[in-house]
Image (cartoon, helix red, strand yellow):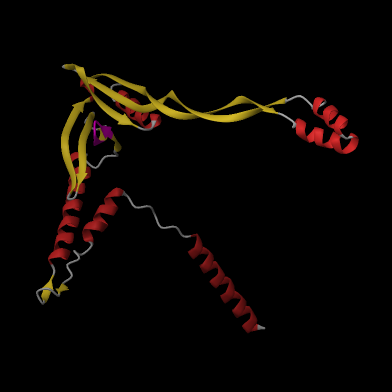
Amino acid sequence: MFWWIVLTVVLIAFASFLALAASYKPPKKSLEDYWNEERSKPEPIIQKYNQDIGIFDDSEEVEKARLQKARLESRDRFYKELLRGLPVTLCRSGGNGAAISIDEKSNEIIMLDYKIETEGHIVIDHKCISAKNIIKIDVIQLKKTTTVPVESYVPVVTTKKKSALGRAAVGAVVLGPVGAIVGAVSAVPATNITENKKVISMEQREIDGDIVLSIWEKGNLTSPKKFIFSNTDAALAVKYHIESLNT
C-alpha cells in the first residue's frame, strides 16, 4: 500500500510539472534586448576552400560578417542615438521611409527621413522640433482614381424559325401532295427569345488613398513637413500625442 501512495504522489508531481512546462511562455523581448542579443553573437568568419587557387579563402564570409556588423551599428545609431531609444512610428515621406518619435521630457518631436541599403539605415534628414514651435497639425484622407471591372446584363433577342419543309414533309406522308402544301402553309411563325447576356466593362472610380499628416512650424508656414500613413489611427495617434505636449 505504501508504494502505491508513493507512486501516486510521484505521478501527480510529474503531471503538474508537465502542465507548468506546457503553460510557460517566454517573456517578449524588448527592442533593446533584441539588439543586445544580436551584437553578442560571434561574427561568422568561416574559411572556405577555393578550388581555383588551391588555398582557403574566407573573403566572402568576412564580407558577410562586415555587412552584418554595419547593419547592426546603423540600426543602433538609428534607434538609440538619433531616436533616443523612444517608441517609434514608421511611415513615409516622399519616396523614402520616415520615423517619428516624441520625447515627452524635452517636449520635442524627432523626425527622420531614411532609406535602407546594403549596409543598413542611411539617414537623409534628421530634425528635432520643439512642440512650442508647432502651430498646426492636420490629418487628411487623400483620394485616388482607379479602374474597376463592372458587371452588367444586356438583353439579347434571338429569333428562332421552324422549318416549313419539315411540316411539308410530314403533311406529304400523311395526305400526299395536298398535305405537303397544307403543312408548308401552316408552318408556325418565327418566335423571339430574349436572354440576358453578361457584359463586363471598366469604369473609373474614386477610392480612399493615403493619409497625410502635415506639421506646420513657426517660420515655415508655406512648406509643412508631410508624412504619409496607410492607417488613419496611426496618423491620428501621432497628431493627438503632439498636441498633448502643449496642453
The quadrant in which residue 133 appears is top left
Residue 104's place in the image compared with 25, above or below, is above
Task: Kindly tell me whether residue 122 is visible in this rendering.
Answer: yes
Point 35% across, 25% down: residue: 240
Query: Which is nearer the eye, 35 or 176?
Result: 176
Stretch in magenta: 92-98
Task: Kindly tell me whether residue 103 is visible in this rendering.
Answer: no
Residue 223 position, x and y percent, is: 20, 19
Query: Which is nearer the eye, 237 or 229?
Result: 229
Residue 192 appears left or right of 233: right
Residue 167 position, x and y percent, is: 81, 33
Query: Which is nearer the eye, 4 or 242?
Result: 242
Residue 91's place in the image compared with 156, above or below, is below
Question: Is residue 112 one of those drawn in magenta?
Answer: no
Point 31% across, 23% down: residue: 243
Point 63% across, 78% down: residue: 5
Question: Is residue 93 one of those drawn in magenta?
Answer: yes
Residue 5's place in the image compared with 158, above or below, is below
Q: Quadrant of the C terminus?
A: top left
Residue 110 position, x and y percent, is: 22, 33
Point 36% across, 30% down: residue: 237
Residue 2 appears left or right of 213: right
Q: Residue furthest right?
A: 175
Q: Quadrant of the N terminus?
A: bottom right
Q: Main SS type for the magenta part?
A: strand
Task: Tell me how many marks there are.
Answer: 0
Query: Which is nearer the eye, 230 or 163?
Result: 163
